Amino acid sequence: MMDTERAIESAETLLRQWAILVDDIAPWRLDVLIPASELRSAARMLCGTEWGDLTSITVLELGDEGREYELIYDFRRGPALVCLRVQLATLSDSIPSLTEICDCAQPFEASFTERYGIVFD
């Protein structure tokens, strides 16, 4: 088994306890939908075990009406990619901040607060 596949397998094992849905899109990528309330725990697990680093956060509009949103947190370990996905009913819903866990989250969060009004706490 390749190192990338082992990395994805270990991430799935680490995150399964919080997962609402797990989708192994490709041998190098794992998408895990988690509740917003578990975001810090899941990020701590990835960073605390030195699985990988947070490399980006994306806001995605779901549907044509733009009434639901998803934040996608990308963690990388070499070529392996884990996407933690958190759904928001509205942009006014608050979401846990990851700045205390991953310093690099701060500019993303500040930008999303300014641009979309998302509240990180």
Image: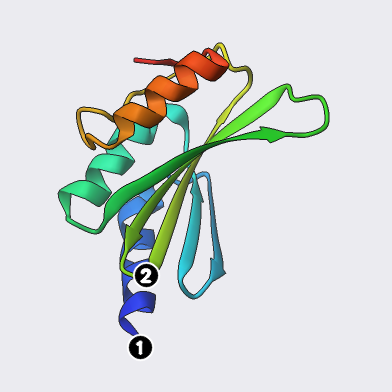
Label 2: few (<14), some (14–19) or many (≥20) C-alpha neighbours in 10 Å: some
Residue underneath mark 1? 1
Which residue: 38% across, 68% down?
Answer: 8
- Which quadrant holds the N terminus? bottom left
Which amino acid is tagged 2? Glu
Give residue 36's position: percent from left, percent from top.
Answer: 45, 29
Say which residue appears at 37% left-offset and 33% top-offset: 38
Q: Considering only order in the chain, which callout, 1 or 2, is on the residue closer to the N terminus? A: 1
Mark 1 crowd level (few <14, some 14–19, many ≥20, 10 Å Cα): few
x 37%, y 34%: residue: 39
In the image: residue 1, left or right of residue 70: left
Q: Quadrant of the C terminus?
A: top left
Of all residues, the one furthest to the bottom in this rendering is 1
Q: Is residue 118 visible?
A: no
Residue drawn at point x = 27 percent, y = 37 percent = 104
Q: Secondary structure at mark 1?
A: loop
Q: Position of residue 42 (x, y in %)?
A: 32, 42
Label 1 is placed on what type of residue? Met
x then y, percent, for residue 119:
44, 13
Depth check, front residue: 107 or 105: 107
Task: Give the answer, above or below, for where 58 lies relative to 14.
Answer: above
Disc 2 from disc 1: Cα separation: 10 Å
Colour scheme shown: rainbow
Task: Evaluate whether residue 15 shows in this view.
Answer: yes
Q: Secondary structure at mark 2?
A: helix
Question: Image height check: is 46 above or below 79?
Answer: above
Question: Circles 2 and 1: CB distance less than 8 Å?
Answer: yes
Residue 9, disc: 2
Q: Quadrant of residue 105?
A: top left
Residue furthest out toward the right:
64
Q: Position of residue 4 (x, y in %)?
A: 36, 76
